[in-house]
Image (spheres, rainbow, N blue to C red):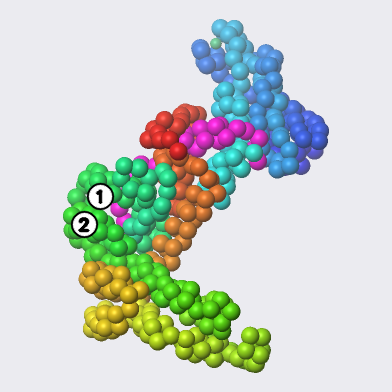
């Protein structure tokens, strides 16, 4: 008869002597007592007998989502036949002196493995305080340095948590092959990177064969110094991002010069995706109210490119680079790259001057990015976008987060499949291990 109840509340029915459920609008109480066991005396190892019950103990058991649920647990007391001392039976619901059940702690930790939940959301749904949720997290997650992977991706993220003296960015390192996060450092400064790599044995560093970075000079310096066997490549995703930023500036510069009510303004504003995104152009013509006739996307694109010589030139160069980035191989990338570089330089578009310097300064590292199968290049692009995106979203939802130690562990727990939590009774806090700062 208890099967339904014990199943519903995840309780092992074999040990239950009696269970009574009482419910009000916002609280469910499970009154539980256990079958007596044949226990040996913990003091003299003698035979014991049941001697009565302990005072009821209240344990939070967050099994229900719509209300608080508690276990009112009346533990058995035993007495030793030999030495007559008394002691309590085992508590199957939680550690001695804990106020939350194993199930509650598991629920809490599972939620914390997902970056979409903030500590206060987890606290609320489990009917405990934020401080308590954080204490569990600090105690159950312990992540020492993770071994360097064979292919490292280094990137950064803007955050108030970054050590202010150094930089406004945290450094995010991913395993390009296994598609997971393996480290976050509190700054992307050279000093911080040195501190990290200095502690890693040379044999381990020498097993890194590939490093993808964005165009932040210290990453290159560090990789040259510490990862002697690694090929250093610029992540193509970052190069393309710079290119697109420059190209957008060409469009905006023109848009702000033409009349607000003009056809040019309309095209540059409403149809910007046609030149900035990868759009299918040869669709069936659709009636366009502005032009009062049927047009397809290619017609519109031609009109946009007709607005300005510079825009058309900028567009052609951008497409040229994207095509190269998509299709070049290890064999042809070098000569292809050089002809594109010449074309960009010759065009002398001021909006592209920054991109021309990038091509100049990072030629070797851009070409190195082609020295791996096309599939892997695409994977690493998607990866840096994906992991950084999730961390950024987490930073946004947990507005005002300031404890770097906890933040690092939280991201690693969520974004590395080989990191696990372990529920134990040694509670501690990461509260004071972080560098305190005012906001
Ligand atoms: Zn005894």
Label 1: few (<14), some or many (≥20) within 10 Å?
some
Query: Which quarter shows the C terminus?
Result: top left
Tags 2 and 1 touching, CB below 8 Å: yes
Tag of residue 190: 1
Pick the front one: 276 or 111: 276
Queried on whether the Cβ of the residue with tag 1 lies below 8 angstroms from ligand 1, the answer reads: no
Q: Horizontal placement of 308 versus 370: left or right?
A: right
- Using the numbered discs, state the Cα–Cα distance from disc 2 to disc 1 in whole angstroms: 8 Å
Is label 2 in a helix, a strand or a loop? Answer: helix
Which residue is rendered at x = 45% and y = 43% of the image?
Answer: 407
Q: Which mark is residue 27?
A: none
Residue 144 located within the stretch drawn in magenta: yes
| Residue 250 higher or lower than 138, as above or below | below
Earlier residue among tags 2 and 1: 1
Asked whether residue 420 is in view, the answer is no
- Image spot of residue 201 (x, y percent): 21, 47
Q: Position of residue 181 (x, y in %)?
A: 40, 54
Q: Nearer the viewer, residue 41 or 181?
A: 181
Q: Which residue is drawn at the image coordinates 52% and 16% (left, top)?
A: 42
Q: Which segment did they paint magenta? A: 125-152
Res. 335 image quadrant: bottom left
The label on residue 221 is: 2
């Amino acid at each position: 008869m208890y099967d339904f109840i014990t199943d519903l509340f995840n309780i092992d029915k074999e040990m239950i002597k009696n269970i009574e459920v009482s419910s009000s609008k916002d609280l469910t109480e499970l009154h539980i007592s256990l079958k007596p066991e044949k226990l040996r005396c913990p003091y003299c190892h003698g035979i014991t007998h049941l001697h009565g019950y302990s005072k009821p103990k209240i344990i939070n058991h967050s099994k229900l989502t719509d209300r608080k649920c508690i276990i009112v647990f009346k533990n058995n007391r035993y007495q030793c036949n030999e030495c007559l001392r008394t002691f309590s039976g085992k508590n199957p619901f939680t550690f001695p002196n804990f106020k939350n059940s194993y199930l509650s702690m598991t629920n809490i930790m599972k939620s914390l493995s997902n970056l979409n939940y903030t500590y206060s959301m987890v606290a609320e749904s489990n009917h405990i305080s934020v401080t308590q949720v954080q204490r569990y997290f600090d105690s159950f997650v312990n992540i020492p340095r993770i071994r360097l992977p064979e292919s490292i991706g280094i990137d950064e993220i803007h955050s108030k948590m970054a050590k202010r003296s150094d930089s406004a960015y945290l450094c995010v390192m991913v395993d390009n092959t296994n598609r997971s996060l393996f480290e976050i450092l509190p700054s992307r400064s050279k000093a911080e990177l040195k501190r990290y790599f200095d502690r890693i044995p040379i044999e381990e560093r020498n097993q890194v064969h590939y490093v993808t970075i964005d165009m932040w000079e210290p990453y290159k310096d560090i990789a040259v110094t510490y990862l002697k066997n690694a090929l250093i490549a610029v992540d193509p995703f970052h190069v393309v991002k710079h290119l697109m930023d420059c190209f957008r500036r060409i469009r905006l510069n023109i848009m702000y010069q033409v009349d607000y009510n003009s056809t040019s303004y309309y095209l540059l504003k409403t149809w910007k995706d046609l030149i900035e995104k990868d759009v299918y152009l040869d669709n069936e013509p659709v009636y366009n109210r502005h032009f009062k006739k049927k047009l397809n996307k290619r017609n519109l694109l031609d009109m946009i490119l007709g607005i300005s010589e510079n825009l058309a030139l900028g567009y052609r160069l951008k497409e040229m680079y994207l095509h190269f980035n998509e299709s070049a191989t290890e064999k042809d990338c070098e000569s292809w790259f050089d002809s594109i570089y010449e074309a960009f330089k010759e065009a002398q578009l001021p909006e592209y001057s920054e991109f021309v310097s990038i091509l100049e300064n990072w030629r070797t590292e851009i070409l190195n990015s082609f020295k791996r199968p096309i599939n892997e290049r695409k994977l690493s692009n998607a990866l840096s976008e994906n992991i950084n995106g999730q961390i950024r979203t987490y930073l946004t939802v947990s507005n005002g987060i300031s404890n770097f130690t906890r933040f690092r562990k939280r991201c690693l727990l969520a974004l590395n499949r080989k990191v696990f939590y372990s529920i134990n009774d040694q509670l501690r806090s990461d509260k004071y291990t972080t560098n305190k700062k005012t906001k």
